[in-house]
Amino acid sequence: MKRTDEARTILITGAGGFIGGWVAEMLHLQGNWHVRAGVRRWPSAARIARFPMEIVLCDVNDPASVAMAADGCTDIVHCATADGHTIVDGTRNVLEAALQIHARVIHLSSIAVYGDAPGHVPEDTPFARHGSEYSQAKVASEYLCHAYHQRGVKTVILRPTIVYGPYSTWWTTNVALRLLTGQWGNIGSAGGGTCNLVYVLDVVQAIRRALRCEAANGQAFNVNGPSAVTWSEYFAEFNKALGLPELKNVNPTLARWRSRLLFPARCFGKFMLEKHRGLLISVANRSRRIKSALKSAESTLRATATSDQLALYGLKAHYPSGKAEQMLGYRPHFDVEAGLDMSCAWLKHSGIIER
């Protein structure tokens, strides 16, 4: 059964972010519902402020802020994410607010809940017992959804795969900057794992369909794209879309050793950026040589995969969206070629890369 859009107010948490921003924009443009875009800080509303939608402060770490933002809403699309603490406590605060106002919650989770499970990975695959902070936080947030569903909150869990497209930092901007260094190559078998790409507008479609489907309550759905490519193929296609020279072949063993050798430098660089960013900027501005050396080091680190990234690039796993297609009517529309064309157009338009 589908829900009608009339007289519905939908709060979107994390509307200043990549996916949340797209959800706010597209629901505003495509639906009859009233969209309330929740942002943690006013500066993050710059992107969505060009649309005449309601924008409110909503810090998911603050129960009072969430309750105020959710007041009067019929639905909450929970897109806000950050560190593990924010993922877990933020989800709890959203669910508690929904319980008080009898709102329905569409919770954006992740395939990270499956960890490194290989092969065919449907929704009933056991959660990963051990994994990254992000993975374990997403698992904990899903347990919270189940617990609150038992208390009367109607919840739907969506597990997108690798979400890319305009405004994506991880899988669009960072990949483009890596390729632009000219130091990234075809890593062969080290990149032979499955790259489960889903374009951001297909994720928005799944959210929109979940909002209109009462039968989805209490269910979890994988949300994947239509293309089955390897990571090496994704990098090659992205490189081609950027108009760059063909990637050179790199020995997979060499790529793994390079990752291990640069691990200490990566950790030190991360520490300095987190604790002494101002000092680094000040020193770099005083010396051209130091500034050039820092840029060279940044380029080298950017072009070197971490051990976690190499593990992902080698994982052969597929997350079928058959359940979402059957129950929600979800149909992914954007293949890799179309998604990369739009992503590269945005990268050039926004000035992240030169035209």
Image (cartoon, rainbow, N blue to C red):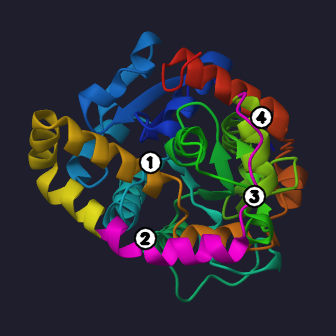
Q: Residues within 10 Å of mark 1 (few under 14, many from 20)?
A: some
Residue 312: give its label: none
- State yes or no: residue 264 in magenta: yes
Q: Is residue 193 left or right of residue 220?
A: right
Q: CA distance from mark 2 to mark 3?
A: 22 Å
Q: Residues within 10 Å of mark 2 (few under 14, many from 20)?
A: some
Q: CA distance from mark 2 to mark 4?
A: 28 Å
Q: Amino acid at mark 3?
A: Trp
* Local SS, label 3: helix
Cβ–Cβ under 8 Å for marks 4 and 1: no
Q: Earlier in the sequence, mark 4 or mark 1?
A: 4
Q: Which residue is mark 2?
A: 262
Q: Camera-side residue: 348 or 56?
A: 348
Q: Give the foreground label among 3 and 4.
A: 4
Do we see residue 74 in this rendering? no
* Local SS, label 1: helix
- State yes or no: residue 269 in magenta: no
Q: CA distance from mark 2 to mark 1?
A: 12 Å
Q: Which residue is mark 4?
A: 240
Q: Earlier in the sequence, mark 2 or mark 4?
A: 4
Quadrant of the frame with the C terminus: top right
Q: CA distance from mark 4 to mark 1?
A: 20 Å
Q: Is residue 148 left or right of residue 127?
A: left
Q: Which residue is mark 3?
A: 231
Whether residue 341 is situated above or below residue 332 in the rendered picture:
above
Q: Earlier in the sequence, mark 2 or mark 3?
A: 3
Q: Which residue is mark 1?
A: 299
Q: Earlier in the sequence, mark 3 or mark 4?
A: 3
Q: CA distance from mark 1 to mark 3?
A: 21 Å
Q: Earlier in the sequence, mark 1 or mark 3?
A: 3
Q: Give the magenta range.
A: 243-267
